[in-house]
Amino acid sequence: MAEAAGTGACRHVFLVHGVCHGGWCWYKVAARLRSLSPPGRSYHVVAPDLAASGVDGRRLREVATFRDYTAPLLDALRSLPDGKKAVLVGHSLGGFSVALAAEELPDKVAAAVFLCAYMPDCASPPAHVLLQHAKSNRDSQLDNEMKPQDGGGKLPASFMFGPRFTEQNVYQLCSKEDITLAKSLMRIGSVFLEDLQDMEPFSKDRYGSVRKVYIICKQDRTLPEEFQRWMVSNNPVDEVQEIDGADHMAMLSAPDDVLKCIANIAEKYNY
């Protein structure tokens, strides 16, 4: 995506979507962020489609691992000019992608931001937080579907949000227009549970060394506030910000509040 006007002190911001979504879900925040023009600054905003997501041409069956899934983000981060860093904002499952990017390319990350997102620690495999969430939400999946892609279990299980769960627990504060948009653009994805279980914990000297901010969305029914706060207590961060009046899709239900948080972080965590 194009760079915002101006070539001076540029702030690079990568917006990372969650499961079943694509870069499209960031359209409100991306447009607002590009339109900001603080004196002597500009924003270069990238909202990549991860593998088999958004308009990426791959099918889910072609994406064998979580690293493969996250490759578009890693490639975009590697393409930054020498000496440049980016603020990475991960939403929902995108928190794992941001964590992997911070593990592999810590020198390219100015701050890792978790917007009502899964945030792994450095003591357990990344899947630990997924499993903890599953334990606390066993009866709340409604019509969501998770099923094997193949008989041998070599491919990651697929996942898709159900229409009822989408309206009641993911987009409950969003406009009817955004719900319609989501239902037309969401694709079958995967949470890559098996692969995330097999991964080693992220390291303290790489992922653990990157500055982190958690943005709690208080009306989130997918990752409830209580669970978001548990993740912060499990893996303390540099700063916690809160948004009241945002559901799980905060970038759509409360875009101005999300914009304010991201712009504040981009300026505060200077690089």
Image: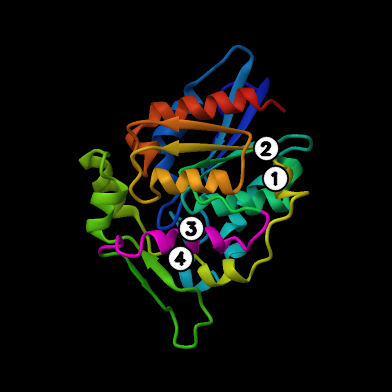
**In the image, which residues are magenta?**
122-142
Circles 1 and 2, Cβ within 8 Å, touching? The answer is no
**Disc 2: CA contacts within 10 A as few (<14), some (14-19) or many (>=20):** some
Label whose residue precedes the other's in the sequence (2 or 4)? 4
Instruction: Using the numbered discs, state the Cα–Cα distance from disc 2 to disc 4 in whole angstroms.
Output: 28 Å
Q: Is residue 32 above or below residue 197?
A: above
Residue 141 part of the magenta-drawn span: yes
Label whose residue precedes the other's in the sequence (4 or 1)? 1
- Could you say where residue 74 lies in the image, as x and y percent from the top left? 65, 52
Circles 3 and 2, Cβ within 8 Å, touching? The answer is no
Instruction: Using the numbered discs, state the Cα–Cα distance from disc 1 to disc 2 in whole angstroms.
Output: 21 Å
Instruction: Using the numbered discs, state the Cα–Cα distance from disc 4 to disc 1 in whole angstroms.
Output: 26 Å
Q: Nearer the viewer, residue 206 or 64?
A: 206
Image mark for residue 190: 4
Image mark for residue 79: 1
Q: Which residue is mark 2?
A: 211
Label whose residue precedes the other's in the sequence (3 or 4)? 3
Q: Is residue 36 left or right of residue 68?
A: left
The kind of residue on which mark 1 rests is Ser
The kind of residue on which mark 2 rests is Arg
Circles 2 and 4, Cβ within 8 Å, touching? The answer is no
Image mark for residue 56: 3
Residue at the spot x=36%, y=32% of the render?
254
Q: Nearer the viewer, mark 3 or mark 2?
A: 2
Instruction: Using the numbered discs, state the Cα–Cα distance from disc 3 to disc 1 in whole angstroms.
Output: 18 Å
Instruction: Using the numbered discs, state the Cα–Cα distance from disc 3 to disc 2 in whole angstroms.
Output: 30 Å
Q: Nearer the viewer, mark 4 or mark 1?
A: 4
As helix, strand or loop, the secondary structure at mark 1 comes to loop
